[in-house]
Image: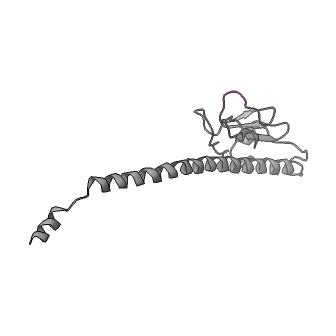
Amino acid sequence: MRRNQMATARAGFTLIELVTVIVILGILSAVALPVYLDYRQDAKIAACKGMLGAVRAAIANYYAYSATNSGGGVLRYPALTDLTATGVVMQDVVGDNPFDTDATKNNVVAGTTKGTVVGNTGGWAYNATTGQFWANTNTTGIGENGF
């Protein structure tokens, strides 16, 4: 009978068991959090490179099309207004830069030298003379404006 009383009296966890679980969870989160943050940064870099590739391909297609009879017969890069207009160079608008730090999303500004941040950081920069397109941001340690 005494054995049943002890079994029913011990229905919860001891303090040592709870502290052990908390310590284990703390160690797991200390290991997992930096890995998660690295994944977020890698995802931003991949998204930035993906959008750069898409826009650069669209600019190259526009350039090649401009040389055809139906494209005007003269090789030229799209003007900044053509690049930002829907359906001229790209089917949709230029996507967001994941490293954008200003309030205006997917803005494209005129630039002169690839990799140089123009004005306030954010969005994209485009040189209509050379057809160069780059991320208009300067995030420390990333160097994504040189992609």
| Residue 76 appears left or right of 134 | right
* Residue at 51% over, 49% down: 33
* Residue at 49% over, 48% down: 30
Q: Nearer the viewer, residue 125 or 21?
A: 21
Q: Main secondary structure of the magenta part?
A: loop
Magenta residues? 115-122
| Residue 39 appears left or right of 75 | left
Total numbered circles: 0
The spot of residue 132 in percent (x, y) is 81, 40
Quick check: 145 above or below 6?
above
* Residue at 66% over, 50% down: 46
Furthest residue to the front?
A: 2
Quadrant where the C terminus sits is top right
Q: Nearer the viewer, residue 94 or 102?
A: 102
Q: Nearer the viewer, residue 134 or 72?
A: 134
The spot of residue 116 in percent (x, y) is 76, 32
Furthest residue to the left?
A: 1
Q: Is residue 67 magenta?
A: no
Furthest residue to the top?
A: 119
The spot of residue 19 in percent (x, y) is 33, 51
Q: Nearer the viewer, residue 32 or 54?
A: 32
Furthest residue to the bottom?
A: 1
Q: Quadrant of residue 125?
A: top right
| Residue 107 appears left or right of 112 | left
Quadrant where the N terminus sits is bottom left
The spot of residue 32 in percent (x, y) is 51, 52
